[in-house]
Image: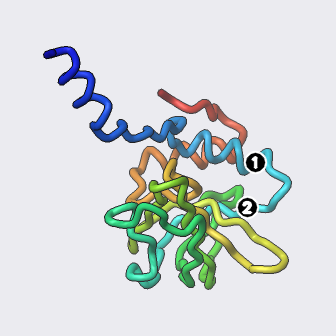
Amino acid sequence: MIRFIAFTLAALAPLPAMALTCLPHSVEATYQRANKAEESYVVVQGRLTFDAKALPDNGNGTQSPPKLTRVPAKISGMALSKGGFDVPFEQPLTLEVACYGPWCGSAEEGDVLTFVERTPQDGYVLESNPCGGDLFTAPKPAMIDQVQSCFAGGACTPTR
């Protein structure tokens, strides 16, 4: 009888939620992906601004958030060149926040390191997804140094 009760309770219990598995999010891995892509990317260190109320709720109460939310945004800062982050870059862009099932990317206003895609149809686009995307919020000096090293042809191996 106890087995039957245990089996019944187990069968009626909610199924465990699927887990989202992502590769480690690093500037090195993001740089390598962007560098190999057919699309054109600009690496920018600066300040990102947008209306945070326009972001999906990241699964907090919504079981089926939209697959993609496009938010008007602006970035003001410096783009990466051979001399470092020394090219002024102030552009409107589209922040694309992707959701994979109930998990959504995130973004915060403030200091960022980004890999901004330049598209012929939409201008500049910045992707955020549940696994990180092309956005690094509040970058540490070591991250800035590392992406400059990658750009200069130095060591660019993702750390684990």
Q: Is residue 159 above or below residue 144?
A: above
Residue to which mark 1 is pinned: 35
Residue positioned 53% across, 59% down in the render: 99
Q: Nearer the viewer, residue 19 or 23?
A: 19
Residue positioned 51% across, 29% down in the render: 159
Query: Residue 146: percent from the left, percent from the top?
Result: 54, 43
Would residue 39 be found to the left or right of residue 9 on screen? right
Query: Residue 100: percent from the left, percent from the top?
Result: 55, 53
Q: Is residue 10 above or below residue 53?
A: above
Q: Which residue is most to the left?
A: 2
Q: What's the coloring here?
A: rainbow
Residue to which mark 2 is pinned: 41
Residue positioned 57% across, 54% down in the render: 133
Q: Nearer the viewer, residue 43 or 122?
A: 122
Query: Residue 116: percent from the left, percent from the top?
Result: 65, 66
Q: Provide the secondary structure element on which disc 2 rests.
A: strand
Amino acid on which disc 1 is placed: Asn
Q: Which residue is most to the front?
A: 1
Q: Is residue 159 above or below residue 150?
A: above
For the residues labelled 1 and 2, say whether their Cβ atoms are less than 8 Å apart: yes
Residue positioned 29% across, 37% down in the render: 12
Quadrant the N terminus occupies:
top left
